[in-house]
Image (cartoon, rainbow, N blue to C red):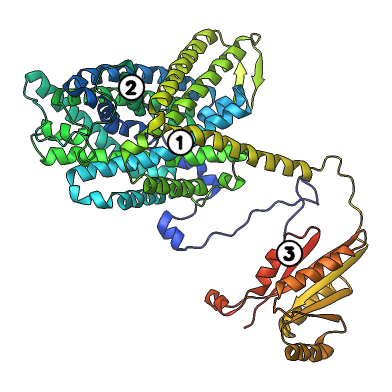
C-alpha cells in the first residue's frame, strides 16, 4: 500500500519492483543497467583517450596520403612540400586545441560547438554548428572504416571486390559494441588504441633512425601513380588544395568537448588533460609520417596506402613488424568510427531536447546510451559507404568542411563569451543555459586565443570550400543548409504543439452532456458481447454497425442480433463494392456532422488477440486497420477492447 507523503494525498510516489527479463538483447548488448548506475559508467583519462581520440589519431593514416594525392602532379618536387605543410597543420592543431581546452572548462556539461553557438551566437548559428558536426560524425564513420579496409586491401589485394560489404559489416560491429555502453566500449577499444600508438611510434622511431644513419632508402616496387588532373605547375591554389586535404588530420579534435559528461569527476580536468595528450600524440605522429613519406618517396594509390609503403620500406618487406603496423593502423581506422558513435548520439540528444530533432533521440537505452542515435548513425554511414563504394579519395572532399565550420562557430562563440565576461562587474555572475558567467581578469587573453582560432579555422573553411568544391564539397555546402531547414521545421512543429497544449489561459472545459458509442462488429460472438458490455459502462446510447458484403450473411447477423444484441440497435450498411472500412468511415462521418455541442463520440472496436503471434497471419486484422483510420478523425475517441480465447 502507498502511504501519503510530502506531496499530499493526491500524488503518491512509489518505486517499481519490475526488472527487465532476459532476452536475446541481453546476450547481444548485455544486461539492462539501472539509472542509478550511471555514475559508475563514466571513464577516466586512460579509457577517455581510447573512446574519444581514435578519430583524431587515426587521421594520420590518410592525411599525408591525401596531401600527396594533390601534390603528385609535381612529380618528385612534391615531396619537398609535404613536411612544411604538415608543420603548418600542426600549428593550426595547437591553436584549435588551446581553444577547445578553454571550451571544456567553460561548458562542463558538454555539447561543444552546438552549445557554445546556442548560448553566444543565437539559434541559427547553433543549428549550423549542429548540422556541421552531425555531418562530420557521419562522414568520420564512412571515411575511417573505408580507410581501414583500404589498409587490409593493401596487404590482401584479393579482398578489393568485397571492400564495400566488409566496410558495412565493420560499421554494424562497432554499432553493437557501442550499444553495450560507454565504459564497456572504452574497455574493448583501449588495447587497440594503445597498440596503435605504441606500434606507430616504434615504426616512426625506426624510420627516423634509419633515415639519420642513411639506411632508409626509397620505397621498392611502388604502386602505380594516380595523378589527379590539376595541371602540372606549382601554384598557390595547388598548395592550398593540398593543405586543405591535410587538415583532415584535425577531425575529431572537438570530440572530447562534446563528450565531457562521459568522464568521471573532476570531469573538466580529466577531459582537458585527455585533449592535450591527444593533440601531442597526433601532432608528433603527423610530422613523423609526413617526414618518412617524403624521405622514401611514397606514392599515393588506392591499391596500397602510404602507411603500408612506409612500413615495408622501414622493415625491409612484409615481415612481422610490417604486419603489426598494418594491423594496428587498420584497427585504429576502424575504431575511429567509435568516436562518432560516442558523440553523434550525445549531440543528437542535446539537439532533440532543444526541439531540433525528434524527441525519441533523447531516450537512453537499456545500457544507458542513446541507442536510437547509435543505430541511426550506423544506418546512415552504411548507406554513404555503399553510395561512394568505400572510396577514401571520393569521401575526403566531403569531410573537413563540417568540422572546420563547427570549429569556427565554436571559437566565435567563445570569443563573444569572453567579451560578455569582460563587461561583468567584479563579483557579478550571470547564469546561461549551458554555463555560468563570472568576472575574470584574464578575459582579454582568452578572447584573443579564441579569436585567433576562429580566424584560422574560418580561413581553412574558405580554402577547403574553394579548392574542393568541384570534387564534391558542393554536396556538403547543400547538405548543411538543408539540415538547418529540417531542424527549423522540426522546431516549429514542437513549438506550435507546445503552444496549443499550453495550460495558460485554458480555463475550464465544458462538461460532456451526451455520450454516443459506436461499436463496429464483424459478427455476433463472445468478443462482440464483451465490447457491448464495456460500451454499457460509457453510455446507454449504443449503436452496433455491421458492414454487409453478403445479403445472406447479413440476414444471419440480424437473426443472431435479435437474440444476443442486448436490446441495442444494429445498423447494417450494404456495401455493393465489397468494401469494409470506407462505408464504416462514411457512417461515422455522418454521425459526427450531426453531433451536438458538448457531445462526444466513442468508437469501441472489438479486437481478437491470438495466443501466438504467428496466428495473426491467419486473421484479417480489420480492427487494427480501422483503429489507424479513425486516428485522424478529430474529436472522436477510439477504444480497443481486446479479447483472448483460451
Confirm whether residue 321 shows in the render. Answer: yes
- For the residues labelled 1 and 3, the Cα–Cα distance comes to 42 Å
Left or right: 450 as drawn, with respect to 639: left
**Neighbour tally class for label 2: few under 14, some 14-19, many 20 plus, Cα within 10 Å:** many
Percent coordinates x, y for residue 193 in the rendering: 30, 37
Whether 217 is drawn above or below 3: the answer is above
Earlier in the chain: of badge 1 and badge 3, it is 1
Query: In which quarter of the view is residue 531 placed?
Result: bottom right
Left or right: 608 as drawn, with respect to 382: right
Nearer to me, 87 or 159? 159
Name the residue carrying label 2: 243
Percent coordinates x, y for residue 508 in the rendering: 90, 48
Confirm whether residue 110 shows in the render. Answer: no
Percent coordinates x, y for residue 366 in the rendering: 51, 52
SS at badge 3: helix
Earlier in the chain: of badge 2 and badge 1, it is 2
**Label drawn at residue 267:** none
> Depth-wise, is mark 1 or mark 3 nearer the camera?
1
Whether 417 is drawn above or below 226: the answer is above
Query: In which quarter of the view is residue 275 placed?
Result: top left
Left or right: 440 as drawn, with respect to 78: right
* Residue at the (61%, 45%) spot, across then down: 359
Percent coordinates x, y for residue 324 in the rendering: 18, 40
SS at badge 2: helix
**Label drawn at residue 475:** 1
- For the residues labelled 2 and 1, the Cα–Cα distance comes to 20 Å
* Residue at the (49%, 16%) spot, across then down: 450
Amino acid at each position: 500500500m502507498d502511504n501519503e507523503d510530502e506531496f499530499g494525498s493526491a500524488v503518491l510516489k512509489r518505486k517499481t519492483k519490475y526488472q527487465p527479463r532476459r532476452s536475446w538483447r541481453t546476450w547481444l548488448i548485455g544486461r539492462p543497467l539501472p539509472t542509478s548506475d550511471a555514475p559508475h559508467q563514466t571513464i577516466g583519462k586512460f579509457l577517455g583517450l581510447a573512446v574519444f581520440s581514435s578519430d583524431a589519431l587515426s587521421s594520420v593514416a590518410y592525411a599525408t596520403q591525401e596531401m600527396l594525392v594533390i601534390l603528385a602532379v609535381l612529380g618528385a618536387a612534391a615531396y619537398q612540400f609535404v613536411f612544411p605543410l604538415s608543420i603548418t597543420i600542426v600549428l593550426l592543431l595547437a591553436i584549435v586545441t588551446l581553444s577547445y581546452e578553454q571550451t571544456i572548462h567553460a561548458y562542463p556539461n558538454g555539447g561543444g560547438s552546438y552549445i557554445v553557438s546556442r548560448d553566444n551566437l543565437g539559434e541559427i548559428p547553433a543549428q549550423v554548428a549542429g548540422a556541421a558536426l552531425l555531418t562530420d560524425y557521419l562522414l568520420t564513420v564512412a571515411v575511417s572504416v573505408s580507410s581501414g579496409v583500404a589498409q587490409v586491401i593493401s596487404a590482401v589485394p584479393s579482398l578489393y571486390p568485397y571492400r564495400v560489404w566488409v566496410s558495412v559489416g565493420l560499421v554494424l560491429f562497432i554499432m553493437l559494441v557501442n550499444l553495450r555502453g560507454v565504459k564497456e566500449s572504452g574497455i574493448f577499444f583501449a588495447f587497440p588504441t594503445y597498440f596503435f600508438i605504441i606500434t606507430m611510434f616504434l615504426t616512426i622511431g625506426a624510420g627516423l633512425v634509419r633515415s639519420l644513419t642513411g639506411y632508409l632508402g626509397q620505397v621498392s616496387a611502388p604502386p602505380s601513380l594516380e595523378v589527379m588532373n590539376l595541371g602540372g605547375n606549382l601554384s598557390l591554389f595547388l598548395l592550398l588544395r593540398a593543405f586543405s586535404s591535410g587538415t583532415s588530420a584535425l577531425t575529431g579534435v572537438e570530440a572530447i568537448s562534446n563528450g565531457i559528461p562521459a568522464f568521471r569527476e573532476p570531469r573538466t580536468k580529466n577531459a582537458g588533460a585527455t585533449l592535450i595528450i591527444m593533440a601531442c600524440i597526433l601532432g608528433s605522429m603527423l610530422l613523423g609520417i609526413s617526414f618518412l613519406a617524403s624521405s622514401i618517396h611514397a606514392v599515393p594509390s588506392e591499391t596500397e596506402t602510404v602507411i603500408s609503403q612506409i612500413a615495408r620500406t622501414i622493415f625491409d618487406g612484409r615481415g612481422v613488424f610490417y604486419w603489426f603496423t598494418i594491423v594496428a593502423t587498420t584497427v585504429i581506422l576502424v575504431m575511429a568510427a567509435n568516436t562518432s558513435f560516442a558523440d553523434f548520439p550525445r549531440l543528437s540528444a542535446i539537439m532533440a531536447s532543444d526541439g531540433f530533432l525528434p524527441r525519441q533521440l533523447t531516450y537512453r537505452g537499456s545500457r544507458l546510451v542513446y541507442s536510437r542515435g547509435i543505430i541511426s548513425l550506423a544506418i546512415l554511414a552504411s548507406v554513404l559507404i555503399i553510395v561512394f563504394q568505400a572510396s577514401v579519395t571520393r569521401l575526403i572532399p566531403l569531410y573537413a568542411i563540417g568540422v572546420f565550420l563547427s570549429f569556427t562557430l565554436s571559437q566565435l562563440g567563445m570569443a563573444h563569451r569572453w567579451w560578455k565576461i569582460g563587461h561583468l562587474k567584479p563579483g557579478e555572475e550571470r547564469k546561461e543555459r549551458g554555463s555560468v558567467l563570472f568576472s575574470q581578469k584574464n578575459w582579454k587573453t582568452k578572447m584573443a586565443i579564441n579569436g585567433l582560432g576562429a580566424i584560422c579555422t574560418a580561413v581553412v573553411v574558405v580554402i577547403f570550400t574553394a579548392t574542393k568544391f568541384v570534387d564534391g564539397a558542393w554536396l556538403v555546402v547543400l547538405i548543411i543548409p538543408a539540415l538547418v531547414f529540417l531542424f527549423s521545421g522540426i522546431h516549429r512543429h514542437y513549438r506550435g504543439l507546445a503552444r496549443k497544449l499550453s495550460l495558460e489561459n485554458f480555463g475550464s472545459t465544458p462538461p460532456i452532456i451526451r455520450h454516443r458509442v459506436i461499436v463496429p462488429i464483424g459478427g455476433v460472438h463472445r468478443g462482440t458481447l464483451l465490447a457491448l458490455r464495456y460500451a454499457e459502462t460509457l453510455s446507454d446510447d449504443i449503436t452496433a454497425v455491421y458492414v454487409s458484403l453478403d445479403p445472406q450473411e447479413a440476414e444471419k447477423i440480424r437473426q443472431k442480433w435479435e437474440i444476443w444484441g442486448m436490446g441495442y440497435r444494429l445498423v447494417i450498411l450494404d456495401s455493393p463494392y465489397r468494401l469494409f472500412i470506407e462505408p464504416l468511415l462514411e457512417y461515422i462521418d455522418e454521425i459526427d456532422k450531426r453531433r451536438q455541442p458538448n457531445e462526444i463520440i466513442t468508437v469501441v472496436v472489438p479486437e481478437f488477440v491470438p495466443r501466438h503471434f504467428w496466428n495473426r497471419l491467419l486473421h484479417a486484422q480489420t480492427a487494427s486497420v480501422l483503429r489507424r483510420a479513425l486516428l485522424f478523425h478529430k474529436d472522436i475517441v477510439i477504444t480497443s477492447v481486446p479479447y483472448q480465447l483460451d
